[in-house]
Image: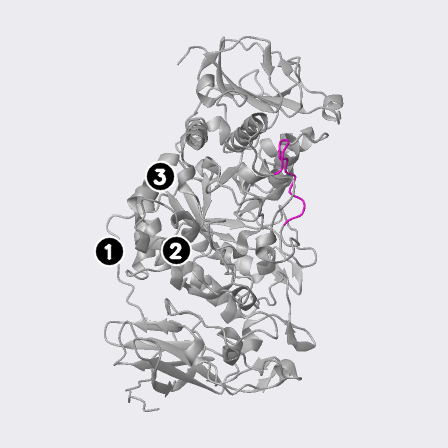
Amino acid sequence: MVHQKQRVWPGSPYPLGATWDGSGTNFALFSAHAERVDLCLFDNKGQREIACIPLPEYTNEIWHGYLPDVREGQLYGYRVYGPYEPKEGHRFNSHKLLLDPYAKRLRGALEWNDALFGYVVGHEKQDLSFDTRDSAPFMPKCEVIDPAFTWGLDRPPARPWHETIVYEAHVRGFTMRHPAVPEARRGTLGGFASHEVVGYLKELGITAVELQPVHAFLHDRHLIERGLQNYWGYNSIAFFALHPEYVGVDGVNEFKTLVQLLHKSDIEVILDVVYNHTAEGNHLGPTLSLRGIDNKSYYYLLDGDPRYYHDFTGTGNALELRHPYVLRMVTDSLRYWIEEMRVDGFRFDLATTLARVNGKFDEHASFLDSVAQDPLLSTVKLIAEPWDSGQDGYQLGRFPPGWAEWNDRYRDTLRQFWRGDGGKLPELASRLAGSSDIYGQRGRRPWTSVNFVTAHDGFTLHDLVSYNEKHNEANQEDNCDGMKHNYSWNCGAEGPTDDPEVLRQRERQKRNFLATLMLSQGVPMLLAGDEFGHTQQGNNNVYCQDNETSWLDWSKCSSEEQTLLAFVRSLIRLRREHIVFHRHRFFQGQAIPGTNTKDITWLRPDGEEMEQKDWDDGAARSLALLVSGEAGQYHLTERGEREPDDTFLLMLNASDGTVEYVLPELEDLWYRALVIDTALNPQEASEKIVKSPLNVEPYSLVLVRYGSDSK
C-alpha cells in the first residue's frame, strides 16, 4: 500500500474531533490508556487508505495533530494501539479502524463481517482471543465537514412549557409514503423538510416535533441476518453525526434547513437521544469506536471483573458517565446540537441509566448535576424517560426540578379507564389534573408530566382500540417481544372487521382518548399518524419493521380519516385557545382568592360534589370536573396580568350505560354550549346549546362551555 505524504504539525488538544478552520484540519482524540494513535485518511470513496499518520502530540490524555493539507470532505478513521487485556478492561486492537466519537458526519454503511470484532469470532476463548484482520473495508468512514450555514433570521420559538404540544415522529416512517415528497428524498431529513410536510404540521397545530433518534446508529447483525433492520434507531454509534441513511445530497445542512423551516412555522425541534449505551454491545460485541479507543475509560465495567459490562438497558453496555471525558463527550454532544444545529430540547431514552452512581439512581449523579449547572443545557427542554431495565430502574417523579418526564401512569390509567376497568376514578382525577401526586413538590409545574396514550413503543391509537393481544409475528421472535400489558380493548372483534357497530365504537374510543389527552393538564404528546388512524396491524414493537408496517400510509387521509384529523385539529386549537387546559400551576381544589369559586370541582352525576365514598366506589365508571375560568392569581400573563378564561364542565363515562348528568347552575354564567360529544360526529357538537339534565352516552366524553354570552 502506497501512502501519500502529509505535513503534520502539533496542533491543539481542543476542540476534540476533526476541526476544519479554513486552512487545515486539527484532529484531537481522548484516550487515557493508548500507547499510540494513528490517523488514517481514505480516498473520496472510502475504499482505499491513502495515508496513516501517527498523531504527534499527547497532552492531558488527548492525542492531537494538525494537518494543513487536509480539507473539508476528507474521509478518515483511527487505529489505536495499546494492550489487549480484556480481563483488565483493555481491548485495544490496531487492526480495527475506529470511528471518531466526535465525528460530525459518517459516510458509507457498516457491512457486517467477523473482521469487525477484536477477537476471533467462534474461538474457544471467545473475546480472550485476538483477531488480526483489517476491519477498514467493512467500516463507514468519518468525514471532515465545513459547518457553515446561512441561518438568516432564524430564532428559536422558545415556547413556554405549558403551551407545548409534542408530536412524536420518525424521519423515515413519516416521509417514505408521503405523496408530496419527491421519491429521491423520501426517508431523509430533506424529505421531512419539504414545505408540504412542514405545512401539514403547522396546520395540525402542534408546537414541537420530537424526532426519534437521528444520531448515527447501526442495524444489528442478528436483524440483518433475518432480513430485518433497526427501524427505530436506539442503537447509537456516533453522538455528533446524523444517521447516514437520513442524509441526502445536501449533507448536514439538510437537518439545519429542517430546523430553520420548523422554527419559521413556530415549531420547536426536540431530539430523542440515546446516551445510555452504544451499539458496541457486550463483551462479545464488535470493536467500532469507544471500545477500541479506550474501553476502560468509556464504559461502565463490572467492579472486580472488568472483562464484563454493566447493562441496565438490555443492550449489553453502559457509558461510564462518572469519567470526566465521557461526561464531557455527552455534554459536548448536547451543546453541539443546540448551538450548531439549533435544536430546542431533548428526550433522553432510558434516562435512569444516565443517573446511576455505583449502580443506583442518584438525583445528584454527575450527568444530572452537570446539566443543572450548565447555563445552556439547563435552559432547553429536557424530557426524561424515567426508567431503565436495571434494578430499581423505575424512577417516575424522581428526576430533578427542571426536567419533564414521560408519564406512563397517565397512559395506563387512561387505557384502563376507557376500556371500562373499575376503581380508577381517584387515579384518573390525578392524571387529568396534571399528576400533582407525582410532581407537585419543589416548585415543579403541571408541565413536568408529559402525557401520552400511545408512543412509538407500543400500539398505535388505532390498534389500541382494535386488538386485545399483540401480533408481533413479523419480528420473528415467536410473538414473545413487546409489551404484554397493553390495557387495550378491541371493541368486540380482533383486528380488521366489517362490523359497523364495532367500527363506530372504535372511532368513538379514538375520540375519547384524543379528547382526554388534549384536555388534561400537563404536556400532551401525540404519536404521528394517530390523528388519521395509522395501523401497524397489531404489532406493538415495530423496532425492526422498516417497511410499510411502520411507514405512515398517507392514503388513509381519506373521508373517514379526514374526519378524525379535523377533530384532532379542533382539539389542539381548543387547547391552545383556552388556558384552563394548560395552566401554569396545579389545581388547589379550593376557592380562588377574591371569589367564591373553586378552581376545580369534582362532581357526581347528580351535580353534587364528590365525597370520599364516591371516590371509593369501585363500580363507578364516570366522572365530571368543573374547571373555573376565573383568573385569580393562577392565570397570569408574562407581565403578571390576569388572564381569565371560560369555565368548562368535562364529563367522562366509561360505563356501558348512559349516565344522566345534572349540570350545575353557575352565577352569571347562564349560557351552556356543547363543545365536544364523542358519541356524535364532531360536526354535530359545535356550540349547540344544552340543557340540564344531559345524557352522556356509554363510552363517551362530553365537554360543555359556560359563558355569559354565546360568543
Mark 2, Cα crowd under 10 Å, few <14 / some 14-19 / many 20+, is some
Q: Amino acid at mark 1?
A: Thr
Q: Residue at x 43, y 43 (%)?
A: 553
Res 392 → quadrant: bottom right
Q: Is residue 138 left or right of residue 667?
A: left
Q: Main secondary structure of the magenta part?
A: loop
Say which of 1 and 21 sits in front: 1
Front in this rendered view, residue 72 or 457: 457
**Boundaries of the magenta span:** 483-494
User: How far, Cα to Cα, is label 2 from label 1?
Assistant: 16 Å
**Amino acid at circle 3:** Tyr
For label 3, the residue is 200
Residue 16 in which image quadrant: bottom left
**Dot 2 amino acid type:** Ile
Residue 338 marker: 2
Pinpoint residue 195: horizontal percent, then vertical percent: 29, 44
Label 1 sits on residue? 150
Mark with earlier residue (3, 1): 1
Instruction: Say which label, 2 or 3, has the lower sequence index.
Output: 3
Residue 452 visible in the snapshot = no
